[in-house]
Amino acid sequence: MTSASADKLSDKIVVSGFRHFFETEDGPVQATGHIDLVIRGGEFVTLVGPSGCGKTTLLKALAGFIRPTEGTLTCDGKPIRGPGRERGVVFQELAILPWRTVRRNIGHGLEIARVPRAEREEKVARLIGLMGLAGFEDRYPHELSGGMRQRVAVARTWAADPDVILMDEPFAAVDAMTRLTLQEELGRLCAATQKTVFFITHSVDEAVFLGDRVLVMTRRPGTIKAVIDVPRRAAGGRDWESFTTDPEMQSIAERVLKLVRAERGASQAEESRAALEATA
Amino acid sequence: MSVLTVPTGRPRHKVRLLNRLAWFLVPAAPFLIVLALWALAGEIFKPSRQTLPPIGDVVAAIYELAVSGQLATNVAASLYRLLLGSLLGLVTGVIGGFIVGLNRKIAETLNPVVVFFNAISGIVWLPLMITWLGIGTALAVFLIWNTVFFIVFQNTALGVQLVSEVYEQGVRSLGGSRWETLRSVTLPGALPYILTGMRTGLGFGWRALIAAELVGAASGLGTMIFDAAEFHRSDIIIAGCLIIGTISIAMDRWLLLPIERRTVQRWGLVADAEKER
């Protein structure tokens, strides 16, 4: 990590007493347990947990897409009341617009902010270069590979220059090799731009590789079970080769894996017990 | 076309030319079959000219109509009504479809009245409307609007409802307003359905137009056909049908398909028939 500035130490995102229920026809269903969380400026926080634990619910509440049943969420001390420019989102499913070219997708946020054309084009060009999209500026998303589309999605969010970036399993749908490259690129991008990132995943390696801090969530209704700090020695030095050969990183990954597996095992045991009871 | 297209034996522009030619000629085959059956029926059943005129008579009728200037006058009158009625139907249908597609409560409130009026066809309106609007353009335009509106309206409402929420959330997170999401997400997202509504609507618009002109106009292709019926001129009736169908195809190919190709096909929202081959 680079030297901590005053901004980096401040609390960027504060979640206190968060709980969420979904309304269904059979009454409310609890999506998450009680969650308290602080994300500091410039921090890269990853959240890992079993599927259905409520990770995405928490992210959606931070993005302002849903109103929490209980608790308060703030960004820079201001309550989150809806989606906003200061909180960018990279979605798991493809959210870039099929009817806009790569260039126009990436520049969309700047267009909305009425950034003058010349400045907009310069910023977009820089991100296109940074994300390895050169030569594809005028392509439509359906003409790109899955990995490239996700690059466009990341670039689009970065171009709008939000303070906080919320990412919901953004690389889950791309192939394994591409995913490794995208993770490294994201690591570099974050080191270069010092953004505050909240990143959801169900991959332990991804969580430890990218995060300054890894949060482990329990099974549904999820609460935060453990917080693991990941020390970084070299500034921005995130590549898979050194990650897999670093014994310290590997031991952290093992610890996280154990915590996650305990949850997954518990939820599976519960499911099979319920299934047995149902058949009995 | 993908950059990774495997090179074929023939140069690409030649393949393209052949494809274009095929695109033009293959759909003509069913028409040739119908013409052949028509000629064959004439040979076998020897019908009277009034029952089924020979192809030559119909061609001669078209020539006569064209030379006398009747054809141009009638086509112009019909096209004017059709375009005016369709445009009105399109604009009101898209606006209505957006309002209903975006708001479940309004949709539920309006659904019965839409179903009610949708069931009342143009023919039912005709006797009432003749007394209200008189004979002429207003009547035809109303009947076309009545047809096009419901088709475009229902397609648009469906299209608006089917636009993925995640696109809207993405644009909102970029700082986009509600208006921005309407403009940059909902409208292009619903476009495949709006275009389908337009294509279907225009076809049914023709039907409404001719129905209106049969009784409620002093000029137009419908009037021409109706007058021909009084004089038992089957050749002119069939000539009228051929002209309606031909204009309809021309509008589809040179007006609506190019719009589709430049938008929803270019964006990969619907399959491109040419690319598949």
Image (spheres, rainbow, N blue to C red):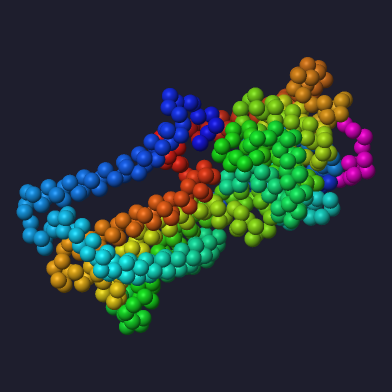
Q: Give the residue drawn at x 75%, y 49%.
A: A118
For residue A67, say whether it is visible: no
Relative side of B224 to B7, left or right: left
Q: Which residues are drawn in magenta?
A: A1-11
Residue A225 picture location, percent across and down: 76, 35
Residue A9 located within the stretch drawn in magenta: yes
Between B261 and B185, the one lying in front of the other is B261
**Position of the N terminus of chain A by quadrant:** top right
In the rendered structure, the answer to whether residue B66 lies left or right of residue A156 reads left
Quadrant position of residue A244: top right
- Tell me what residue is drawn at x 51 percent, y 53 percent: B191
Residue B99 makes an appearance in the image: yes
Identify the residue at image location x=21%, y=57%. Answer: B59
Q: From the viewer's perspective, is A66 left or right of B261?
A: right
Is A251 in front, or is A33? Answer: A251
In the rendered view, tell whether residue A252 sits above or below residue B256: above
Residue A276: give x, y in percent of width and height.
52, 30
> How many marks are shown on the rendered structure?
0
Residue B138 falls in which quadrant of the image?
A: bottom left
Considering every residue shown, the one lying at the far front of the view is: B67
Image position, residue B70 (x, y; %): 27, 69
Q: Residue B198: horizontal and vertical position, in percent? A: 43, 58
Q: Is residue B8 above or below residue A93?
A: above
Q: Is residue A80 above or below residue B121?
A: above
Q: Tell whether position B211 is magenta.
A: no
In the image, what residue occupies the spot 68% across and 49% down?
A108
| Viewer-closest of A98 and A266 | A98
